[in-house]
């Protein structure tokens, strides 16, 4: 994972979220909470104001895929 990352680093964010919240089903997380959790990740350097619903949805789906892979 890069030292810093932003909203466009979907896979890096998904891995970091899976590491930090291994027992959380990503599909149960509200976008408001997801936004907060992402901006609190170590190394996240993106501007919180530049997120969008589309970016959050892409991150949530990548996180879900990573979550599923680790459950197998």
Image (cartoon, helix red, strand yellow):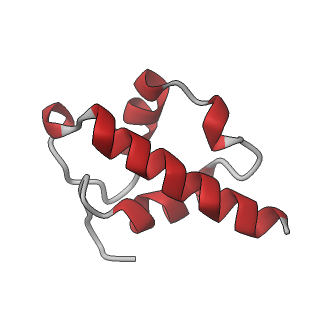
Residue at 19% over, 49% down: 46
Q: Is residue 40 at all visible to an observer of this figure?
A: no
- State the image coordinates of residue 42 (x, y, percent, origin top left): 38, 55
The quadrant of the picture occupied by the C terminus is bottom right
The residue nearer to you, when weighing 52 against 22, is 52
Q: Is residue 58 at all visible to an observer of this figure?
A: yes
The residue nearer to you, when weighing 12 against 65, is 65
Q: In this view, does 3 lie to the left or right of 29?
A: left
The quadrant of the picture occupied by the N terminus is bottom left
Q: In which quarter of the image is residue 56?
A: top left
How many marks do you count on the picture? 0
Residue at 71% over, 53% down: 22
The residue nearer to you, when weighing 59 against 43, is 59
Judged from this view, the residue extending furthest toward the right is: 72
Residue at 40% over, 50% down: 58
Residue at 14% over, 38% down: 50
Q: Is residue 58 left or right of residue 29?
A: left
Q: In which quarter of the image is residue 36?
A: top left
- State the image coordinates of residue 71 (x, y, percent, origin top left): 82, 62
Decide: is 18 above or below 48.
below
- State the image coordinates of residue 10 (x, y, percent, origin top left): 37, 60
- State the image coordinates of residue 27 (x, y, percent, origin top left): 63, 37
Judged from this view, the residue extending furthest toward the bottom is: 1
């Amino acid at each position: 994972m890069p030292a810093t990352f932003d909203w466009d680093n979907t896979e890096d964010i998904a891995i970091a979220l899976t590491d930090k919240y291994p027992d959380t089903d990503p599909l149960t997380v509200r976008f408001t909470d997801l936004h907060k959790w992402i901006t609190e990740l170590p190394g996240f350097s993106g501007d919180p104001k530049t997120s969008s619903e589309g970016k959050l949805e892409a991150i949530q789906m990548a996180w879900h895929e990573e979550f599923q892979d680790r459950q197998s």
